[in-house]
Image: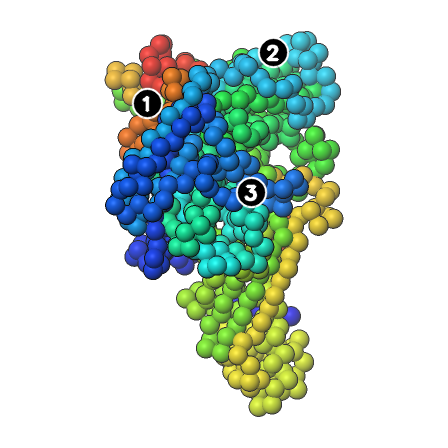
Amino acid sequence: MNSSSEGASIIGTGVPRVDGPLKTTGSARYASDYNFPGLVYAVPVCSTIANGKIRSLNTSLAEGLPGVLTVLHHGNFGPVFRMPPGRGGRVSEDRAPFEDNTVYYWGQYVALAVAETYEQALAGAAAVRVEYDSLPPNVATRLDDVHGDPHVESTRGNPDAAFASAPVQVDETYVTPAETHNPMEMHASVAIWDGTKFTLYESTQGVVNHLNVMAQVLGVPRDNIQIISKFIGSGFGGKLFPWPHSALAAATSRKLNRPVKLTLSRKMMFADVGHRPRTQQRLRLGATPDGKLVSLRQDYRNHTSFIEDIKENCGEATPFLYSTPNLTVTSQLVQRNVGTPTPMRGPGAVPGLYALESAMDELAIKLKMDPVQLRLVNDTLIDEEKNKPFSSRHLKECYQVGAEKFGWSKRTPEVGSMKRGDVILGWGVAAASWGAGRGECNTNVTLNLDGTARVSCGTQDPGTGTYTVFAMVVSEKTGIPLEKIDVVIGDSSLGAGPMSGGSTATATILPSVSEAAEGAVKAVLIMAAKSNGSPYFGKDPDSLAMSNGRVHAKGESPDAGIPFQEALKFAQVAYANGDAHTGGLGSDTKAHDYSMHSFGVQFVEVEWDPGIARLRVSRVVSVVDGGRIINMKAATNQMAGAVVMGVGMALLEHTIYDPRNGHAINDNFADYVVPTHADAPQIDVHFLNIPDPQMGTYGARGIGEIGLAGVAPAITAAVYHATGVRVRELPIRIEDLLTAKA
Ligand code: MOS
């Protein structure tokens, strides 16, 4: 059987987001937009110390204020529970909210004021008097007081001996700061308890995981809980796993028997819902004079909280990015009085590649070798860690395409040697990489009597374009136009689908929605062939096809056929149904033979104006080998957004914890600066668009995270080229550059 719309496939074209009009007209409902009769508001009281115990908590003033219903805290909250060992879902912080009177970080929730209006709840929270037994917090930025021995992440050969005898060596330490996720939409929960069941309106990157976690945390059967997350104002990883406010809202709803709304402030976003942890990474590279890497060693540390051991996986790409016989990657954690870290776009790989790619640039300079050439000399089509071929690695082509588009051959290597008017230009380059993954997925497609289609799956769209991918595939398989396809996601009661994480959602849903759509089409064709009155009655269903929303004989124009809903009418059924349960890469035995990753290259131009000490990223060419691209428009947009985020990482973003009290002192948009339009460079995005043969239907690998990888080290390489200053600690500060020779 096959069935596709006539003419060119919609897959790979640039399709405006099907949910765009709902968002731009304000009709899309986000978690905190839900209101219900009897709804009350909850506002957390946040700790003003970062280490110690609550000595006393006086709520009487707060509880006497108008509209305040209750103040909850460790003495009167619950029941809430931890996740069991073995889990079956991932929570951000194992510690249940209000579990005891210990404070581990500044801003930790210590009480919750609940009132009839938001303003009354705010006033109630402000009136709670908390006294602490405070200990000095540790938020030190040097990560030398390690907790545990180095953990060997990967090793082969003898990197120390090879480094010692290498003719050319680089041995430097690179530092990336704590960064805070700042999606437009802040975290929020609206919780309703109906006496038996919870309905939780959440801003989550994983409705199914949220369900699995909250059922355990609240101590109810999974059947008695439903998570709704129809629209999400982005997450960047900060909304992957449930945070304590969700349990606070839900348990309060059960306690008061009223719907509860809890929205975080931007300030709380800096304390209570994760961040990318600070990293400190020592890189040792040994090479021959012609640039062959003989040794590569990465010893990294990252800070974590006192509640959870969260590793920032900085060696994500190191073991396989380059060919080298001798390699070791180790990790270590350092505990700090900060909130628990969590994945942030390209977790591990992004700070890890800042270090590795910076070291590669330093090596190229020592070798007096072009930095692109150095990468090409060490390219490999074998993952030397796993000793497996890559399913599809075209990094070399990324360099070739990028160098051509950027004009790299015009680069003169001497520091400060390139000028445009009064400004000095710097050109830098760095590689990008991110893992490819695909999980299990359940999808349902129906083709309906009114000529529409419906596709549903228990996943969500945090702004990545997932709604549109579903609609595109159903349209491709049926020829039904996008505007007649209803995509139903953002609800945990639908068949379990993927988290929007790890750049895996697109690859995960593609085989599932294809199979479900094909199943529904097949049902239509059988109806056309087996129903009295159908012009195709008695035909072999395999001789029929569905295109342009019409059933027709294979080889005949769709115009000669009938609208698909006619077949339903002849069969007297309401809709044709297709269900799919597709497995992940783990269940795909063929995929086990391959190492699967996406690759890319970032070419960057900076302008350095020494007269006024002004640094600007002026131009970026971003080339990605991410497998097949499904929606060229959304994908290009995703990459361009990541480049802007990379400008923020290199030049601006930095969560600063006050050593006196552990407070993230720049916890607002005035002081935690993110790039705006004026900071955005000219961005050219190119996709190699080569399907990955091991990835399954369409061969897409997903591109959510890789766009950020490599941007910061390409910027610091360009800054070195312009100024002669090597910045090994992000973000680049103007004062770092005041020593510039140029
Ligand atoms: Mo991504 S950090 O898995 O949202």
Secondary structure of the residue carrying numbered label 1: strand
* Numbered circle sitting on residue 168: 2
Distance, label 2 to label 3, CA atoms, is: 55 Å
Residue 380 lies, with reference to residue 144, above or below; the image says below
Residue shown at 36% from the left, 19% from the top: 733
Q: Residues within 10 Å of mark 2 (few under 14, many from 20)?
A: many
Residue 366 position within the rendered picture, expressed as x and y whole percent measured from the top left: 54, 12
Number of numbered discs overlaid on the protein picture: 3
Q: Is residue 729 visible?
A: no
Cα separation between marks 2 and 1: 31 Å
Type of the residue with mark 2:
Val
The percent coordinates of residue 642 (x first, y second) are 43, 38
Taking the spot 36% from the left edge, 12% from the top edge, the residue there is 740
Q: Looking at the image, tell me whether mark 1 or mark 3 is earlier in sequence order.
A: 3
Residue 32: assigned label: none
Quadrant holding the C terminus: top left
> Quadrant of the rendered structure where residue 605 is?
top left
SS for callout 2: strand
**Residue at which label 3 appears:** 81
Quarter holding residue 161: top right
**Mark 2 / mark 1, whichever is N-terminal:** 2
